Image: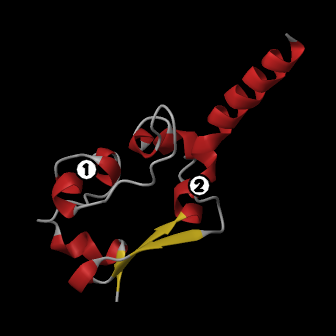
Amino acid sequence: MKTKLVILLVVIISLALMGTAFAVPKGKTLEFPGGKEGKVIFDGTKHAEKELKCKDCHEKIFMSIVDAKKVVGPPELKMDDISAGKYCGTCHNGDKAFSAAKDKKENCVKCHKK
């Protein structure tokens, strides 16, 4: 009985910490291929300076990276989805943060670096 309880606790703690395994903390960056516009650099510091916590995105917006049984990896981010308000576009919609919509060409260089 104790063994089952210990295993259950380990599983629960592991699932609780899983979202932070994919998070980019303050002082770190994450790069994504960005096609002809240049790679996309996610800067953990810029987001931390806005008082965002890892769980703000990883529990609400990017939960598609976690299947009920296994980690399935990050979603394929496409500009059409972001422009439609998914993934980064949830916040980068022009209200909460600068718009990342495809028609806001002046903002492309805020994420895309050649």
Q: Position of residue 79 (x, y in %)?
A: 21, 62
Vertical placement of 45 versus 7: above or below?
below
Residue at the top extreme, as displayed: 1
The secondary element bearing badge 1 is classed as loop
Residue at image point 36% right, 72% down: 111
The mark found on residue 24 in the picture is none
Q: Nearer the viewer, residue 75 or 105?
A: 75
**Amino acid type, callout 1:** Asn
Residue at the spot of label 2: 48
Taking the view exactly as shown, the residue that stands out farthest to the left is: 103
Q: Which residue is mark 1?
A: 93
What x and y, as percent, mark residue 71?
Answer: 51, 46
Q: Residue at x 63, y 51 (%)?
A: 21
Locate residue 113: give its quadrant.
bottom left
Placement of the N terminus among the 4 image quadrants: top right
Q: Residue at x 64, y 58 (%)?
A: 25
